[in-house]
Image (tube, rainbow, N blue to C red):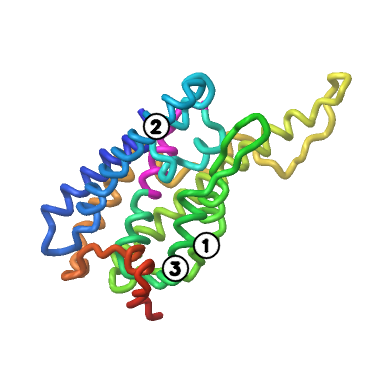
Amino acid sequence: MSSDSNALRTCDALSGDAKSNRNRHPNVLEHGSRTLRQKHIQAVTIISLTLVCKPDLLKTDIYLLQGMWQFSSTRRLKTGGEAQTVQDDLESFVLVVLYMVLRYTNHNKIGDLPTIMAVVFDSYLTWEGGAITGEYGKSQLFRYREFIGRDFRVLGNVPLKCWLKVALTAVKEWHEHLTRVDVGAHADDDAEDEDGSDTDSDSSVAPNENLKKPMFSNHDEFLDFWRRLILRPDWPTEDGAHDRVVDYCRGMVVGASP
C-alpha cells in the first residue's frame, strides 16, 4: 500500500471527525480530501500516458508510480524500492496536511508560497543513469525548517498551530533516528580494514538498542493525537478554505500580517 493511499484514508477519517465537530473547527480537511482525490485522478492520468510513452518505467522505476510525488516520504523518494514503513505513512500524511495548510489557510508565509510549494512538493533531481530523487526540499524542511522558516505560523488557529508543531517535530525526530542508524551502519563497515581485522570504531555513535524511540510508532497513536486535538474548544469558526495559490497568481497577496 502506498503512503499516499494511507494518507488519503487517514484524511477521510479525520475529515469525518471534522464534519462531526463542524461548529468547533474549519472544514479545511474536508475540502482537502476532495482536492487530493482530484490530484490522484490527475496523477493516474499522467502515469497512464507515461507508460504508453515509456513502458520501461514498469521495470525500472515502478516505485515512482505508487503514489503522488508531492506527498511521498523523503525516505521513499531517496531509496525508492525499500519496503513501506509506518513512519513513511505518517510523514506522508503530515505532508498532506502541510500542503493543505500552506495552500488553503491564512499564514505568515503567503508571500513565499510559490517558492515553498515548488521546492518542497515538486522539486526533483535526475542522476546519471536516469535515477530520480526528490527528497531534498522535504528533508531540509523537516530537519531545519528551511523554506517555511522557524517563525512559520498559522494565523488565528491555535489548535492547528499546535498540531503542526508536534507533527513536524515527530518527523524531524524520525529523520534524526534514520541518520543515527545510517551513521552506525557506516561506522560498523569502517571498523573492518582491508585485511578483515577490526579497528577502533567511533565511540560517539550510539548502539542501535539505545536509539531514541520515535514519537509515534503506529497509526493509532497518531490518529488518537489528532482526535484529542479535535475536542479542543478553541477551534476558530468562519474560516473556510481559501486558495492562496490562486490569490498569489492573481496578485492578491493579502492577510499575512505578523
Residue 211 sits in which quadrant? top right
Which residues make up the magenta segment? 81-95
Q: Which mark is residue 17?
A: none
Q: CA distance from mark 3 to mark 2?
A: 34 Å
Image coords of residue 200 (percent x, y): 83, 34
Callout 1: helix, strand or loop?
Answer: loop
Would residue 178 appear left or right of 49 to someone viewing this image? right
Q: Which quarter of the rendered picture does the N terminus lie within?
A: top left
| Between discs 2 and 1, the one toward the N terminus | 2
Residue 143's place in the image compared with 1, above or below, is below
For residue 250, which quarter of the picture?
bottom left
Three-letter amino acid code at the position of disc 1: Phe
**On residue 152, which mark appears?**
3
Question: How much space separates mark 2 and mark 1, taking CA atoms?
Answer: 29 Å
In the image, residue 50 lies at what x, y percent? Answer: 43, 30
Earlier-in-chain disc, 1 versus 3? 1
Residue at 26% x, 65% y is 242
